[in-house]
Image (cartoon, helix red, strand yellow):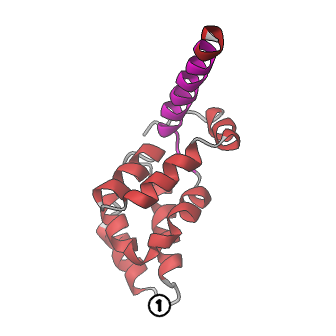
Amino acid sequence: KECSDGRESQSKKDDEQEYISILKKSPEVGDVFSLIKSQSAKWNDIATELKVDDNTRTSVRQDTQLGKDGKLDQILQTWNEAQTSDVTWEKIIEVLKSMKLNKTAGEVKQFLKEPNIIKKYNKAPDFKP
């Protein structure tokens, strides 16, 4: 029984290390959007926390063709393409927590612990500005 517990404990450590490793990866915008879409009404606050520049935020705000989901998607695209701040999963979780969106942050964490997501992002390089 001890042997089994030891292996299980090692497996949990390995899973945790993989999760920590993924936090440093650049997320795909589609993955982030699908996870935080429920918060799209807060797109401007999210943009501020992600340090998206004022001109972009103003442009997105004035675009009457975009609904709140479109505005959030545009902000995430801009953030991802700019590569000027920390474009990582860790940053997304940090932003959600700073905005007191802990439930959504928890959903992101759960997503990152799914085996197919671990496999997908483990192959990606770490973010480097």
Is residue 39 placed above or below 82 in the rendered structure? below
- Residue at 39% from the left image edge and 86% from the top image edge: 62
Residue extent of the magenta highlight: 6-27
Q: Position of residue 115 (x, y in %)?
A: 68, 39
Q: Position of residue 32 (x, y in %)?
A: 54, 58
- Residue at 65% from the left image edge and 14% from the top image edge: 4
Determine if the magenta segment contains residue 24: yes
Q: Is residue 84 visible?
A: no
Q: Quadrant of the N terminus?
A: top right
Determine if the magenta segment contains residue 26: yes
Q: Is residue 17 visible?
A: yes
The answer to whether residue 45 is left or right of residue 5 is left
Q: Which residue is mark 1?
A: 64
Q: Position of residue 2 (x, y in %)?
A: 60, 9
SS at circle 1: loop
- Residue at 48% from the left image edge and 39% from the top image edge: 23
Q: Position of residue 38 (x, y in %)?
A: 50, 72
The answer to whether residue 103 is left or right of residue 107 is left
